[in-house]
Image (cartoon, rainbow, N blue to C red):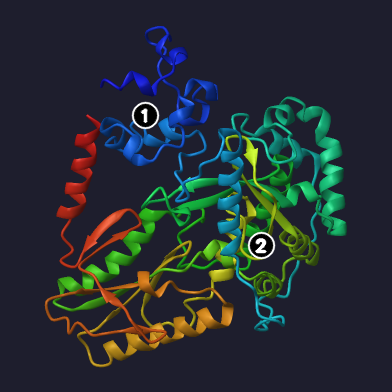
């Protein structure tokens, strides 16, 4: 494919044959990309680039900006030296604006599920093993300690790191550098000019992540030992995946449809779920699991007084206070979120499947009481949402009616009628109300064709 030469600086044009173009993350010195086009609006970009599918290798993001190529909605007439700082500040202000303020008090009180507790200290062998697994091609955190340095000096630093980790766990004191995150805005979908279409992923201290990893292993082992893992959760769970979620759910659905029955599926969407988890309520749930008190206290300190800053082309925004949520990009974040949401299906009569915050529930509705049961289940989810302060994005919640005898009932959450849909993208797979796979096959064929 021929690309306009005006988009490529002389250093790139002079590369020898076969050199190739590296991915966006390690593309080349920033000076290789024409500065005049780095933050250009999409209308400035040649159609050949914009029409390329994701993952092609010449993705638009690699040609727009090394920091994942966002074109913010603001159009700033600023000198280039100030543009990156202004963009970073704008994005960080938006990311911080979504944090939720938790209501006063400790929140709902929970009883203990287990009587046993474990006490735990890290060993030098365990720390050495974690150091050997460090990926040297990963980015360093705000503390400036490169992962390659940690791995190459593992024999030297294993003992002092072990002492540091044990002392931190014993006292509950978390180094400030471990509570600071460099946030990289990752494009999701929709307009690239909207700040809300970017997910904040935190780059944190690699040393801190080593301790997070070992704590996570102990928490997971504790949950397995006491059978406290949520069997409906397929996200961030060993041995489970998007595939197991879809197979489990639609095996149940298709058995009903194949016998002439009818099913209603509610696809539920949380609003900024990972960013709005209330900390006191999360800590209550951790305590209810009878985890070692030192671990709970350490996580409490790890969550408190966190700061974040957005990075754009090596330029930092001002720091912002993180008042809720679990850090996306951290090691502990996913397991803490799973624990927080683990009781969402309690008391639900219908079939429930989760993948992290992606939640779907269905009921058979061609039998007496089926529609009422679905309505009651949605009411229970509404109460859970209010109790635990994790809000649904009602406008994005959908209902799908399956089966020829489906009465196509109307459902509400928070007095809002849920929109009916004939087609929904479920964990990357297009599901239609007739359960045919033609839409998914056409989409896959189209993507493959564009890559040729």
Considering depth in this image, is 65 or 323 the residue closer to the camera? 65
Res 222 label: 2
Which quadrant of the rendered structure holds the C terminus?
A: top left
Farthest left residue?
A: 404
Residue 380 in view in this figure? yes
Considering depth in this image, is 201 or 33 the residue closer to the camera? 33
Q: Residues within 10 Å of mark 1 (few under 14, many from 20)?
A: some
Farthest top residue?
A: 16
Q: Is residue 195 above or below residue 45?
A: below
SS at badge 1: loop
Residue 347 in view in this figure? no
Q: What's the residue at 80%, 54% (across, down)?
A: 174
Q: What's the residue at 69%, 39% (across, down)?
A: 130
On the image, which quarter does residue 125 sit in? top right
CA separation, marks 1 and 2? 43 Å
Q: Is residue 203 above or below residue 407?
A: above
Could you say where residue 144 lies in the image, as x and y percent from the top left? 73, 35
Could you say where residue 103 lies in the image, as x and y percent from the top left? 66, 80
Could you say where residue 270 lies in the image, as x and y percent from the top left? 46, 69
Q: Is residue 131 above or below residue 395?
A: above
- Residue for badge 1: 57
Which quadrant of the rendered structure holds the N terminus?
A: top left
Considering depth in this image, is 218 or 80 the residue closer to the camera? 80
- Total numbered labels: 2
Q: Is residue 21 left or right of residue 118?
A: left
Contact, CB < 8 Å: mark 1 with mark 2?
no
Q: What's the residue at 34%, 87% (across, down)?
A: 375
| Disc with the residue nearer the chain's start (1 vs 2) | 1
Could you say where residue 431 lies in the image, as x and y percent from the top left? 24, 61
Farthest front residue?
A: 77
Res 380 label: none
On the image, which quarter does residue 335 sit in? bottom right
């Amino acid at each position: 494919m021929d690309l306009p030469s005006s988009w490529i600086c002389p250093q790139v044009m002079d590369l020898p044959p076969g050199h190739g173009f590296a991915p966006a993350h390690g593309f080349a010195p920033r000076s290789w990309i024409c500065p005049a086009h780095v933050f250009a609006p999409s209308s400035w970009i040649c159609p050949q680039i914009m029409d390329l599918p994701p993952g092609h290798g010449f993705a638009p993001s690699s040609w727009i900006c090394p920091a994942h190529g966002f074109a913010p909605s603001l159009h700033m007439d600023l000198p280039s030296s100030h543009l990156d700082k202004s963009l970073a500040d704008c994005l960080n202000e938006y990311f911080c604006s979504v944090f939720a303020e938790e209501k006063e008090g400790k929140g709902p009180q929970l009883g203990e599920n287990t009587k046993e507790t474990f006490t735990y200290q890290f060993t030098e062998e365990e720390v050495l093993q974690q150091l050997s697994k460090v990926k040297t091609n990963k980015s360093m955190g705000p503390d400036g300690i490169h992962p390659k340095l940690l791995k190459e000096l593992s024999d030297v630093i294993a003992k002092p790191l072990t002492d540091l980790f044990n002392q931190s766990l014993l006292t509950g004191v978390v180094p400030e550098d471990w509570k600071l995150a460099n946030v990289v805005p990752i494009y999701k979908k929709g307009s690239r000019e909207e700040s809300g279409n970017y997910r904040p992923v935190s780059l944190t201290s690699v040393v801190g992540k080593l301790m997070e990893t070992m704590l996570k292993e102990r928490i997971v082992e504790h949950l397995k030992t006491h059978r406290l893992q949520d069997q409906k959760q397929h996200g961030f769970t060993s041995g489970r995946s998007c595939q197991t979620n879809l197979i489990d759910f639609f095996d149940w659905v298709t058995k009903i449809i194949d016998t002439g029955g009818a099913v209603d599926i509610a696809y539920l969407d949380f609003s900024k779920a990972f960013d709005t988890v209330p900390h006191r309520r999360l800590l209550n749930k951790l305590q209810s699991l009878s985890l070692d008190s030192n671990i709970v206290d350490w996580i409490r300190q790890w969550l408190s007084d966190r700061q974040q800053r957005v990075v754009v082309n090596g330029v930092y925004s001002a720091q912002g206070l993180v008042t809720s949520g679990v850090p996306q990009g951290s090691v502990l974040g996913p397991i803490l979120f799973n624990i927080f949401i683990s009781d969402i299906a309690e008391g639900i009569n219908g079939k429930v499947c989760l993948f992290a915050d992606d939640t779907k529930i269905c009921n058979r509705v061609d039998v007496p009481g089926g529609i009422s049961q679905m309505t009651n289940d949605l009411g229970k989810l509404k109460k859970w949402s209010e109790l635990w302060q994790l809000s649904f994005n009602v406008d994005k919640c959908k209902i799908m009616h399956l089966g020829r005898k489906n009465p196509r009932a109307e459902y509400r959450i928070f007095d809002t009628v849920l929109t009916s849909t004939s087609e929904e993208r479920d964990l990357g797979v297009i599901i239609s109300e007739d359960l045919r796979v033609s839409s998914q096959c056409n989409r896959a064929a189209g993507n493959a064709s564009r890559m040729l």
